[in-house]
Amino acid sequence: MQQKLQTRAFEQVTPILQSGEQPVVATRAMVGKFSSGRLGTVVSQAMVLEGGGALLGAALASTRKQFVVLTNRRLIFLPQTFLGGPGKKVLGEVPREQVSLAEAKMGVVSLLRLAFGAPGDGVALTFPRVDKKNAESLADALRQAPAA
């Protein structure tokens, strides 16, 4: 099922890709502020983005369940539809060279902290157990140097 969702996410971002830009990995995630913990992000219903909000704008703060698409040039955030698929609207994006994997914790609830340059700027992505492999794929892709 994840492969089908990833393919749909790639299709959603295809119209906005730059010449030579290729999608690498896409997954659904719960987006929270950079300092949030695994259970805090999953349980909490209110999300306030600090730091990363300066780069991504207020749009990310309004939607917790999102689809994250990593390309060789940027990280793109899409809303998640009611059925869990990728939405059409782009909520925000960050140039790939400004995104780094600050922390990865895999477990029943997996957590990836993505830093966006300045200390404390970024987001925390949490993944339920069913999406653990997706979290691992995204973490592996983020560990790779961005390709031009």
Image (tube, helix red, strand yellow):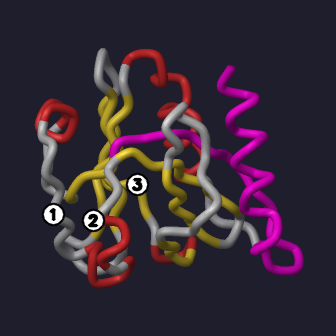
Residue at 57 percent across and 64 percent down: it is: 76
- Give, as a three-letter code, the residue at label 3: Leu
Between the residue at mark 3 and the residue at mark 2, the CA separation in whole angstroms equals: 20 Å
Q: Which mark is residue 11?
A: none
- Give, as a three-letter code, the residue at label 2: Ala
Residue at 46 percent across and 68 percent down: it is: 99
Residue at 20 percent across and 58 percent down: it is: 33
Q: Is residue 133 above or below residue 45?
A: above
- Give, as a three-letter code, the residue at label 1: Val
**Of residues 60 and 27, the one drawn nearer to the viewer in this rendering:** 60
User: What residue would you read off at disc 3?
Assistant: 101
Contact (CB < 8 A) between labels 1 and 2?
yes
Contact (CB < 8 A) between labels 3 and 1?
no
Dot 1 or dot 2, earlier in sequence: 1
User: What residue would you read off at disc 1?
Assistant: 48
Residue at 40 percent across and 54 percent down: it is: 101
Q: Is residue 4 covered in magenta?
A: yes
Q: Is residue 94 above or below residue 72?
A: below
Q: Helix, strand or loop at disc 2?
A: helix
Q: Which mark is residue 61?
A: 2
Q: Which image quarter holds the N terminus?
A: top right
Dot 3 or dot 1, earlier in sequence: 1
Q: Is residue 76 covered in magenta?
A: no
Residue 15: quarter of image: bottom right
Marks 3, 2: nearer the viewer: 2
Q: Position of residue 14 (x, y in %)?
A: 81, 63
Q: Helix, strand or loop at disc 3?
A: strand
Contact (CB < 8 A) between labels 3 and 2?
no
Tell me how many marks there are: 3
What segment is highlighted magenta in the picture? 1-30
Q: Helix, strand or loop at disc 1?
A: loop
Q: Residues within 10 Å of mark 1 (few under 14, many from 20)?
A: some
